[in-house]
Amino acid sequence: MRVILFTGKGGVGKTSVAAATAVRCAQAGYRTVVMSTDPAHSLGDSFDVELGTSMTPIAENLWAHEVSALHEMQRHWARLHEYAVEVFATQGLDEVIAEEVANPPGMDEIASLMWIKHYAQRGEHDVLIVDCAPTGETLQLLTFPDAARWWLDKVYPWERRAMKMARPMLQPLMDIPLPSDEIFASLKDLLLDLDGMRKVLTDPDITTVRIVLNLEKMVVKEAKRAFSYLSLFGYMTDAVIVNRLLPGELHDELFKKWQRIHKRYQAEVEQSFAGIPIFNVPLFDSEVVGETMLQRMANAIYGDNDPAERFVTASPQRVARSPFRGCSRSAKRPAPPSTTASFACGSPSARTRSNERPRTAGPCIFAAQAAGRRMALKPASGGPALLVTHLSDALLVGPPLPWLRPPDAANLRRTSAPGRS
């Protein structure tokens, strides 16, 4: 089965592009399912049909599905849902509202992953198109299997044991119901169902990601960061789709200014995503709603290409283990003259902005701004170094994840030096 995920900043047209791709795949003879993982669904609006919480036929060879985490909780994980409702109700929340908001953190990601696994395992369809939530939520979705596995291995056994011992003493003193051992067992079963999802999602023969963007500064910057993160976690990006390009024959001064803006950022996109096919989609003269307009968009995107094709077989951005054992952190060009960049990383005194808290020591990844630059990075706490090749903007990654920021000039000092670590 072929799985294609569409992501990008909110409002760039991901849903329209995903729906157009699904229409084209279905017309090419592929049995196609398009599903939305965004809690604010608009997939049905794109097809101009009413979609439910289960697979709905749209046309020949084409089905659509809007995933509802609340519905999945009620249908498959009733015990967890009942406990969440009970917690909210004891705090004075109206019973009806409690039913609606009883959706624990992570359930949107779990429900979406479960349906991706469901379609991939059953093999009843040829192509699965996933209309993802905006970039941040997509990254949470794709990293959730790893986070769930870590929690089950490292935290869950101790937390369950501690709660089992403390519950008899604490419960009489609290007005909030503490989770029973049955709740912990249900949660474990739920997360164990995600086993194998990372293997499916990171297999480039099965799954690829396509980034949708508009030619605006904030959108392009977020797309570049998303590309780096996806590469870091092992997800293959096989296409970039530039949506809503203005036609060249406009004469209005306002639109001419926007054309100049588009041309400036188009050059940046071509440089930043070198090695990945870039498909340009014009701004149409009517809204992209309904099968006819979706077909028109699909023709503009893919031309004579097969939309289910893997347009890239090897990512130009890679993260791999390296045998380097030194304590240095350096970035160097493979070709002379060599340039070495040293920087403070993982140090408690290192800050990316003057008002931010210090980073903690630990593993880090630094992606140089120049294309083709290679780095051997040694974690401060020991262990193998990382060999990194990146094409996009500089990116510093260090735990904990919420602190991710690009480094500033104070953390990066460039000096000419022989090409060695």
Image (cartoon, helix red, strand yellow):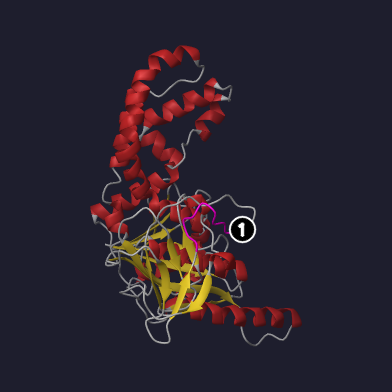
Residue at the image point whose x is 62% and y is 86% from the top: 248
Q: Position of residue 103 (x, y in %)?
A: 47, 36
The residue tagged with tag 1: helix, strand or loop?
loop
Residue 299: in sight, yes or no? no
Q: Position of residue 381 (x, y in %)?
A: 37, 53
Q: Is residue 298 above or below residue 79?
A: below
Within the magenta stretch, is there residue 351? yes
In-front residue for pair 181/167 = 167
In-front residue for pair 219/409 = 409
Residue at the image point whose x is 30% and y is 29% from the top: 185
Residue 162: in sight, yes or no? yes
Left of 245 or right of it: where is 273? left
Q: Position of residue 149 (x, y in %)?
A: 31, 44
Within the magenta stretch, is there residue 206? no
Q: Quadrant of residue 171?
A: top left
Q: Is residue 248 above or below residue 330?
A: below
Q: Dot 1 corresponds to which residue?
A: 353
The quarter of the image holding the C terminus is bottom left
Q: How many marks?
A: 1
Q: Which residues are magenta?
A: 344-352
Dominant secondary structure of the residues highlighted in magenta in the image: loop
The quarter of the image holding the N terminus is bottom left
